Image (spheres, rainbow, N blue to C red):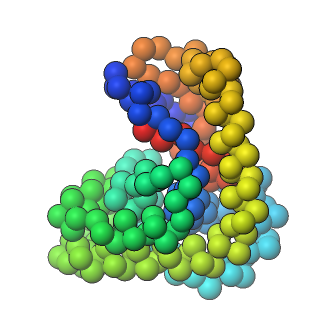
Amino acid sequence: MPSRLHFGEDDFLRCRFAVSPLWETQEVVRMLKRPERQGYHAHWLRRMGRVAAGLDLTALWLLMPRRGHCPDWLCPPPIGPAATFEEEIAAVRASDPAAARADTVMSLADTPGALDSPQARKWLQDPVRMIEELSDAMEEAWRALIAPDWPRLRTLLEADVTFHSRRLAEVGSADCCRRSTGGSAGRPGRSPSSSRAGTSGGSAGRAWS
């Protein structure tokens, strides 16, 4: 499904490349929610299937609607270009409970019936406990699914960031946007994207604003 990215006047000025182990963890969890759509990860799914089957990811999946909002507090922009998972998850654990609760309500509202589920009611009654539970779940997913392969994945992601940084210096942001969107031309204030919502990021470096 085509996506459309909307940018404010200053957004491009704040864009940066970063490698985020937390983001990669979230995208792997998202991939496991709908593995039938991830044929290009079939080898990894076969290799890690037994490990994944031993994890309870239902709480994280509840905040990954098919279409709509995923909580920003649970996977915020990286705190640096090469932050460790431990640094990123510490920032998640330090989230403001009131802000996290409001952000979670927005996400739950995008999945029919989710706001009325027992799990959601528990979270909204005690957002401090919600932050702890979801941070623990994300950390467990990291240790089981990403950490064993992280040195190799990090090398690949860093190489991707280097490539795109050099490309940005050579041709500028307009050409980089056309390259990342399959040659589509953007209009002021928006950028078309051919990526499908809900797919895993795999081995691509990230651009953040």
From the top left corner, tell me how far across and down residue 122 is, in percent. Answer: 24, 79
From the top left corner, tell me how far across and down residue 123 is, in percent. Answer: 26, 74
Residue 14 appears in which quarter of the rendering?
top left
Residue at x 73% of width, y 56% of height: 155
Q: Is residue 96 visible?
A: yes
Residue at x 73% of width, y 46% of height: 159
Residue 97 appears left or right of 201 = left
Residue 193 appears in which quarter of the rendering?
top right
Is the residue 40 above or below the residue 141 in the image? above
Residue 182 appears left or right of 125 = right
Is the residue 161 above or below the residue 82 in the image? above
- Image quadrant where one finds the N terminus: top right
Q: Is residue 101 visible?
A: no
Residue at x 68% of width, y 67% of height: 150
- In the foreground, 43 or 120: 43
State the count of labels.
0
Is the residue 195 above or below the residue 70 in the image? above
Residue at x 65% of width, y 42% of height: 161
Residue extending furthest toward the bottom: 54
- Image quadrant where one finds the C terminus: top left
Is the residue 65 above or below the residue 139 in the image? above
Residue 40 appears left or right of 120 = right
